Amino acid sequence: MEWLMRLNDLLWQWILPVGLILTALVCGIAQKFAPLRGNSRLFVDTCGSLFGKCPDKTSGDSAPSQRQIVATALAAAMGTGNLIGTAAALAAGGAGAIFWMWISAFAGMLLVYAENVLGIFYRRKTKDGWCGGAIACLRYGLHAKRLAVVFSVCCAMAGLGMGSMAQGNAIAAAAKQFSVAPPVTAGICFVTGFVILRGGTKKIGHVTVWLMPMLCGIYVLGCSILLIRNAARIPAAFAGILRGAFGFRPMAGGFSAAILMQSLRVGMRRGIFSNEAGLGSSALLHMEADGNSPDIQGKWAAVEVFADTIICCTLTALVILTAPSLQYTSETDGAALLLAAFTIGFGSYAGDFLAVVLMLFAFATMIGWYPCGAAAFRAVFRKKSEDIYRMLYLLMCLIGALGEPAWIYAVCDCCNAWMAIPNCIGLWKLRGTLAAETERIKKAYEDTECQYNGSGRKICNGA
C-alpha cells in the first residue's frame, strides 16, 4: 500500500500534470488550437444544434443519439469529484488552485478534441462491436497492440474502482443522511444498476439524457441562490483566485513562490481528475456516435470539459469563497467544507440538499463510466465477456456501498495514470495525422456547397 501511494505521488505530483499540459500544447499546435479557436462555432455547432431542427440521429435506431452520448459522457465526468474535489482543492491549494483548474480545463479541451478526432478517424467496426478511441489509435494507428492492451486493462480496472466501487461508497455515505442502512443502499444500487446496464449504451443514454439536465439544473439552482445572496462578495472571490494563482499573499502582501507552486500543483491535479481529459475515456463514449464527423465529436467533448470544470467547479468554488465567515483553508475534509458552505446559506436543509445531489451525481457517474470500462474489457476479452464485466461492475458497487476500502482510491489513481501514459504517447506520435485531419475538416467547413451541421450530418447545396 505504501509503495503504491509513493508511486502515485511520483506520477501525479509533476510528471503527469506537466506531461498532459505539454501533450495538450503539441495537440493544440497540430490542430491549430481548435476548438479554442473560434469559440462561437464551438457552441453553435454543439449546443446550438439542440435548439434547432437538426436531428439527433442520421440513420437507424441501433446507435445512441448525440444527446444520449453527450449526457452519458457528462454523467461519467461530472461526479462527486466536481463537488468534493473542488472543495478539497481550495482547502489544500487555496483560492489560486481554482485558476489552475481553469487552465487545466482549457488544456483538457485541446486534449479531448484531439482524442475524439483521432478516435473517430481510426475507429473500426469489428465483430465485437466498435473499436475506437485510444484503443483504436494505439492498435490501428501505431500498430502497438501491447500498448493498447495496457490501456484497456487499466481502463477496465479504473471502471471497476472509480466508476463502480467508489461511487457505490459515495451513494451509501450520502444515503445515511436519510437513515438508510448501507446494505439497503447496496441492494438498491445493484438491482437498479443491473436493470439499466444490461440494456447497454442505448439504455444508459435513455436514463442519462433526462437525469443529467435535471441533476445539473438542481445543483446550479442551489448554487445560484447562494451566490445571489452573497453577490457583493463575488468580486473579492475572483480577486482572491487571481492573487492566489500567482503567489500573492492576501493579507500581508508580497509574493510567495511556495503559494504559487502549491496552488499550481493542486489546481492542475484536481482539474485533471475532474474533467478526465487526457485519460482517453471520453473518446470511448463518443466512438459509437451515429455520424462520421470527427470534428463534431471533438467539439462536443470540449463542451463537456467546459461544463464540467469551468461551470460546475467554478460554481462550487464561488459558493465556498463567498460564504460569510467560512475559513476554507482551515478545513482538510472536502466534504465537510462543502457542507459548511451550504449550511451557512441553507441552514439545516443543507445536509438533505447535498445528500440528494451527491447520490444522484454518484449514480450518474456509476452508469456513465460503465461503457468505458466495458469497451476496454471487450477489446481484450471479446464481446462474450461483457456479461462477466457487468457482473463484476455491479459486485464492486455492492462492495463499495458496504465498506470503505482505502486502497481503492490509490489503485484508481494508478490505473488513471497508466491510462494517461499510453494515451499521451498515441497523441504525440499521431500528431501528423491529427494535423492532416484538422486541415481536411477546415476545408470541409470552408466549402460552401457542403458542410456538417450540429449533429454530424452532411448538408449539401443548402438541402
Image: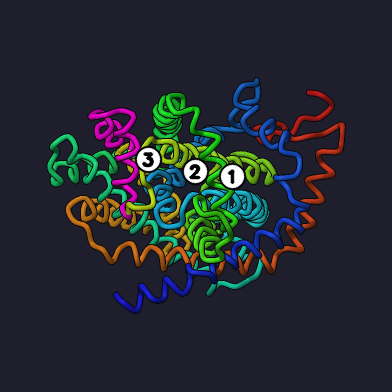
Please, what secondary structure does the residue beneath circle 2 have?
helix
Q: Is residue 112 left or right of residue 354?
A: right
* Mark 1 → mark 3, Cα distance in angstroms: 17 Å
Q: Earlier in the sequence, mark 3 or mark 2?
A: 2
Name the main secondary structure of what is drawn in magenta. helix
Please say whether residue 429 is visible from this viewpoint: yes
Q: Magenta span covers which residues? A: 332-357
Task: Tell me if residue 103 is in the magenta stretch.
Answer: no
Answer whether labels 1 and 2 touch (C-beta < 8 Å). Answer: yes
Q: Which residue is mark 2?
A: 73
Residue to which mark 3 is pinned? 364
Is residue 341 on the magenta stretch?
yes
When the figure is inspected, residue 321 is found, relative to residue 17, above or below; the finding is above
Q: Could you say whether the residue bearing mark 3 is in a helix, strand or loop?
A: helix
Residue 444's tag is none
Q: Residue at x 62, y 69 (%)?
A: 425
Q: Where the C terminus falls, by quadrant?
A: top right
Q: Residue at x 34, y 57 (%)?
A: 389
Per the rendering, the mark at residue 301 is 1
Query: For residue 442, what is the image quadrant?
Result: top right
Residue 96 placement, left or right of 361: right
